[in-house]
Image (tube, rainbow, N blue to C red):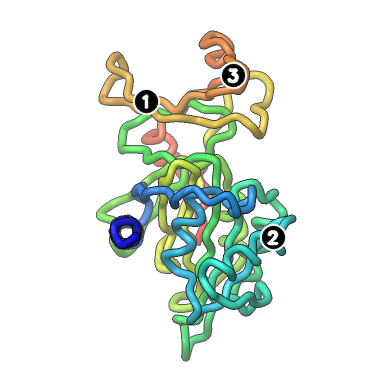
Amino acid sequence: MMIREDAELHRAQRAFRSVLDAFARPGTVQSIELAPGNPARPAALDAALEAATRLFVDQAVTFCVADSETDATAAYLTSETHARRAPLRDADFVVVPARADAQTAREAVAEACRGTLASPEKGATVLMGCARLAEVPEGSQVAEPAVHVVALRGPGVERENRFAVDRADWLRARDARGDEFPCGIEIVLVDPDGRVAAVPRSSRATLLDVKQLAQGSATREQMFHVKHSGSAPGGAVEIGASAAGGASAASAEDRAFSVSAASAVGCASAAKEVR
């Protein structure tokens, strides 16, 4: 029992350092170890999102779950962390599972507490689940249906850090809030494989306009993965679709689109600036 507890403690410490690195270098993608399997865990809460939530949520704070199965997930987190549930606008931490629809995610970000000028630390942290995260190095190419490339600037960023994510509802809602620093919210993106990226309130985020070249639309179940292509110039990174049912490579290529992230950054008219 002691060995198991020590192993879990060390896992949590490593995960906490990774999340600190994500906040220290906004827009970079870090990795955390998944939480151990638990048969009581609700289906809405994947192991990575639970591991990230446990780093922040304990008996000293309040939380809210934004999902269709709010009660089951909230009851589980209360039992595991002893934290207290609170309404969305009052919660210290807001947990949004990856399966939450766009409207739910937007409402969670839009209504999260921004803090006050006297107490900006009361601003909420939104733990946003997503299907996949991937870092986009400078000069790389992105190829994937319905992927969004986000560029971050501000404290902790030398020039610009970029990452790819499958959803942008949270970013549009963040833009619509119109928070003025030091008030605002922190957002931590978490995918099922344990990749995390932080978007602090002090960061300026830009959603790049990635134009889809393929015909047809991608299904919501499609995922994307990052692979380094030996034949791609300049160490390009390709993010390709992986459809269920063993879709052929040719079919994936027909659906894929390709855009140069570096070119997109250079086109001011093709970018929407998000505060």
**Closer to us: 95 or 180:** 95
* Residue at x 64% of width, y 32% of height: 221
As drawn, is 197 to the left or to the right of 3?
A: right
Q: Residue at x 45, y 41 (%)?
A: 193
Q: Nearer the viewer, residue 31 or 84?
A: 84
Q: How many marks?
A: 3
The picture places residue 134, in percent across and down from the top left corner, at: 41, 39
Q: What secondary structure is found at the residue carrying circle 1?
A: strand
For residue 239, what is the image quadrant?
top left
Instruction: Please name the residue that numbered disc 2 is placed on.
Output: 72
What is the distance, in whole Å, between disc 1 and disc 3 at their CAs?
Answer: 17 Å
Q: CA distance from mark 3 to mark 2?
A: 37 Å
The amino acid pointed to by label 1 is Lys
**Disc 3 packing (10 Å; few <14; some 14–19; many ≥20):** many
Left or right: 168 in relation to 138: right
Q: Which comes before the other along the chain, label 1 or label 3?
A: 1
